[in-house]
Image (spheres, rainbow, N blue to C red):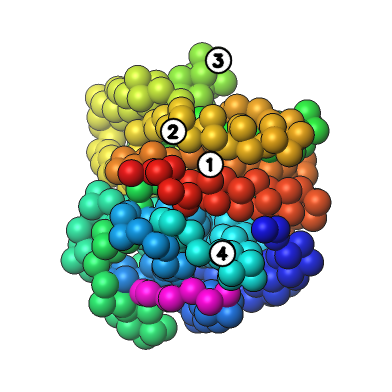
C-alpha cells in the first residue's frame, strides 16, 4: 500500500482555499467557512469508501470497518483554524488519515481492527473556549451539555451553531473511543527543519494554563492627575506582565509565558485607564513549573490589592503535561527506520487533541518539518516531499496497529 502523493498535496491546497481572504485564511469553529471545510472533508471520506458518523459535539468520524469488533485504531486532527492561519495545522492530519483509508480501499485490504479518522471540533479554541473541545467531550473531560451551552466570542451558542451548519450529530462521542491513537502533524517549530530530520517522534506535550486577568483602578484626567496620586490600571497590569515574562526569560518558570490580548478602558489617549484586562498563556513540560507560575501570578495580583487595586483572575483553559505511550513511540521509530528515515524524539510545545486521547488510550504523534518553524501564520509551509513522507509513515504505523493482535 502507498499514499497518493499528488492527491494528498492537491487536497491540502484545495482545503486551504476555504476561508481565504487577503492572503490568509480563517475557518473558525462552527462558522460558515468551517461548514464548507467540513462538507469537503466528508465528501473525501465517502470517496475513500468510509462510513461517516457525526457525534453530538460535531466530531466527524470516517470509519473503515475491520474484521474484529474490538475498539478501533484512530488517527485524525482538526480543520478549524486561528484567525490568520496557514493551510496545514490540523488539516494535514485529517487529509493524510483519509488517504490512509483510501490506500486500504485501493488495495482491497480489510484491516483486522477498525480504523477511524476523526476531525475534532474546535481544537484551536479561538471562537469557543476551552480549546480541544471535541476531544475533551469524547474523553469525558467535559460534559456534552456543558459544551453545547458554551457561548462564542461573537455571542452564539455552540449547540445552536452545530445545528445551523448541519453538524449536530446524534451519536455519543465516547462511542468512538479507540484502543490506540496516532496523530500526524506539522511540527510548528524549527527543530526538525534546522536539523534536516524528516520525522519527529513526539514523546509528550507541554502542559498549559490560560488565564484572564482584570485589574480595576480609577479612571481620571491624564493632564490633571499627578503621577503619585494615580491608580492607573494599565500601569499596574503592565508591571505584573513584566514580572511574569521576565521570570520566564530568566528562570524558564514557566518555560514560556505569552500575553496574547491586552485592553484598556475607557481607551482614550487623555484618560488614565481605570480598567485593564489581559490574557496570559503559561506552558511548561512539567506540572510543577505550571503550578509555580500560577503561584507567582497570584502573588503579583495580591500585591496590587495592597496598593488599592481590585483584581480578578479567571481560568480559561488548562491541561497538564502529558507523556505519550513509550511502546507506540517505538513502533513509529521502527517504521521510520525500516524506511531508512532519520527520526528524532521530541516534545510538542503546542497543544493537540492527542493530549486528551492520551488520558484514555496509548497515544503518540508524528511530526514533519515546518519551514523556519512558522505556524499559525499564512507563511506556514512544509515541503511536499516531507508531507508525503509523514503520510507514508502514518500509513505503515496504522497498518501495523490494525493488524491482528497488534492492539487489544
Please say if 387 is above or below 368.
below
> Residue beneath label 1, please?
365
Label 1 element class: strand
Q: Which mark sits nearer the N-terminus, 4 or 3?
A: 4
> Residue beneath label 3, please?
250
Residue at image position (51%, 24%) is 255
- Within 10 Å of the Cα at label 4, are there few (<14), some (14-19), or many (20+) other Cα atoms? few
Label 2 element class: loop
Mark 4 or 1: in front is: 4
Please provide the residue range marked out in magenta: 48-54
- Mark 4 vs mark 1, CA separation in Å: 24 Å
- Mark 2 vs mark 1, CA separation in Å: 8 Å
Numbered badge on residue 324: 2
Magenta stretch: residue 51 in it?
yes
Mark 2 or 3: in front is: 2
Numbered badge on residue 334: none
Residue 120 percent location from the top left of the image: 43, 62
Amino acid at each position: 500500500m502507498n499514499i497518493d502523493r499528488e492527491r494528498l498535496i492537491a487536497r491540502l491546497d484545495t482545503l486551504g482555499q476555504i476561508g481565504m481572504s487577503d492572503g490568509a485564511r480563517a475557518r473558525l469553529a462552527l462558522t460558515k467557512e468551517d461548514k464548507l471545510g467540513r462538507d469537503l472533508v466528508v465528501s473525501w471520506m465517502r470517496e475513500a469508501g468510509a462510513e461517516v458518523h457525526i457525534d453530538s459535539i460535531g466530531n466527524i468520524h470516517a470509519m473503515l470497518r475491520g474484521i474484529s469488533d474490538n475498539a478501533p485504531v484512530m488517527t485524525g486532527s482538526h480543520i478549524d483554524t486561528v484567525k490568520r492561519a496557514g493551510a496545514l495545522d490540523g488539516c494535514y492530519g485529517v487529509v493524510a488519515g483519509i488517504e490512509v483509508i483510501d490506500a486500504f480501499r485501493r488495495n482491497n485490504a480489510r484491516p483486522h481492527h477498525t480504523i477511524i479518522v476523526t476531525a475534532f471540533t474546535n481544537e484551536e479554541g479561538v471562537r469557543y473556549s476551552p480549546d480541544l473541545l471535541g476531544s475533551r467531550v469524547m474523553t469525558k473531560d467535559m460534559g456534552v451539555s456543558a459544551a453545547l451551552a458554551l457561548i462564542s466570542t461573537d455571542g452564539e451558542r455552540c449547540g445552536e451553531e452545530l445545528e445551523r451548519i448541519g453538524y449536530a450529530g446524534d451519536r455519543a462521542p465516547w462511542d468512538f473511543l479507540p484502543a490506540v491513537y496516532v496523530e500526524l502533524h506539522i511540527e510548528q517549530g524549527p527543530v526538525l527543519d534546522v536539523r534536516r530530520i524528516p520525522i519527529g517522534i513526539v514523546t509528550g506535550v507541554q502542559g498549559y494554563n490560560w488565564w484572564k486577568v482584570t485589574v480595576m483602578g480609577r479612571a481620571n484626567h491624564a493632564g490633571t492627575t499627578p503621577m503619585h496620586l494615580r491608580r492607573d490600571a494599565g500601569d499596574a497590569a503592565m508591571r505584573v506582565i513584566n514580572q511574569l515574562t521576565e521570570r520566564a526569560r530568566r528562570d524558564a518558570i514557566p518555560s514560556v509565558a505569552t500575553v496574547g490580548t491586552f485592553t484598556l478602558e475607557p481607551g482614550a489617549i487623555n484618560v488614565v485607564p481605570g480598567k485593564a484586562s489581559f490574557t496570559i498563556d503559561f506552558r511548561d513540560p512539567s506540572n510543577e513549573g505550571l503550578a509555580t507560575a500560577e503561584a507567582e501570578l497570584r502573588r503579583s495580583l495580591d500585591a496590587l490589592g495592597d496598593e488599592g487595586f481590585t483584581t480578578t483572575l479567571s481560568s480559561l483553559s488548562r491541561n497538564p503535561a502529558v507523556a505519550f505511550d513509550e511502546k507506540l513511540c517505538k513502533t513509529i521509530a521502527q517504521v521510520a527506520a525500516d524506511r531508512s528515515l532519520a527520526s528524532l524524539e521530541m516534545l510538542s510545545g503546542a497543544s493537540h487533541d492527542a493530549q486528551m486521547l492520551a488520558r484514555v488510550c496509548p497515544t503518540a504523534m508524528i511530526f514533519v518539518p515546518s519551514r523556519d518553524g512558522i505556524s499559525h501564520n499564512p507563511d506556514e509551509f512544509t515541503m511536499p516531499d516531507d508531507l508525503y513522507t509523514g503520510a507514508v509513515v502514518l500509513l505503515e504505523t496504522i497498518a501495523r496497529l490494525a493488524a491482528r493482535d497488534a492492539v487489544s
